[in-house]
Amino acid sequence: MNKKVDLTNAVWAKSEMSNGGDNCLEVAFVDGVVALRDSVDVGDPDAQVLVISKKDYEFFTKSVQAGQRNLLLP
């Protein structure tokens, strides 16, 4: 996917299971896509953000919930 996404007004959230700590995955739903970032990068204008489709995000989260934890392996 090659889509320029404006994250200026993105509302980022992380799991309640993170206990308010750093090194957590944050997610924002923006312009029909899902943006993902590491919480340690908050405030860094050069930080990397992964942008995926909602369909891919839903597939990934449902697969993890179903116990398929090897989804990121090559």
Image (cartoon, helix red, strand yellow):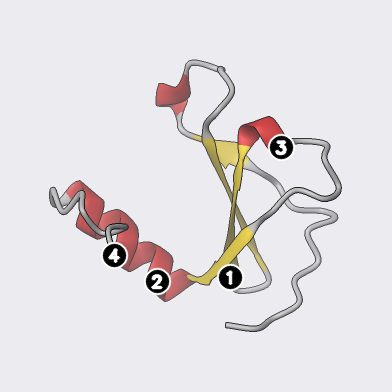
Of discs 1 and 3, which sits in the foreground? 3
Give the x, y percent position of residue 19.
48, 16
Distance from Cα at disc 1 to Cα at disc 3: 20 Å
14 lies above or below 73: above
Which residue does the numbered mark 1 point to in the structure image?
33
Amino acid type, residue under disc 2 in the picture: Asp
Amino acid type, residue under disc 4 in the picture: Pro
Q: Quadrant of residue 38 in the image?
A: top right
Count numbered badges in the picture. Answer: 4
Taking the image as shown, residue 3 lies to the left or right of residue 51, namely right
Amino acid type, residue under disc 1 in the picture: Val
Q: Secondary structure at mark 3?
A: helix
Taking the image as shown, residue 37 lies to the left or right of residue 59, namely right
Taking the image as shown, residue 3 lies to the left or right of residue 52, namely right
37 lies above or below 24: below
Q: Secondary structure at mark 2?
A: helix
Of discs 3 and 2, which sits in the foreground? 3
Which residue does the numbered mark 2 point to in the structure image?
56
Q: Badge 1, how many Cα within 10 Å: few under 14, some, many 20+?
A: some
Distance from Cα at disc 3 to Cα at disc 4: 25 Å
Q: Earlier in the sequence, mark 1 or mark 3?
A: 1
What numbered label is drawn on residue 41? 3
Q: Quadrant of the N terminus?
A: bottom right
Which residue does the numbered mark 4 point to in the structure image?
74
Distance from Cα at disc 1 to Cα at disc 4: 24 Å
Taking the image as shown, residue 22 lies to the left or right of residue 56, namely right
Do the numbered discs 1 and 3 sit on residues whose CB atoms are within 8 Å? Answer: no
* Point 55% across, 28% down: residue: 23
Q: Quadrant of the C terminus?
A: bottom left
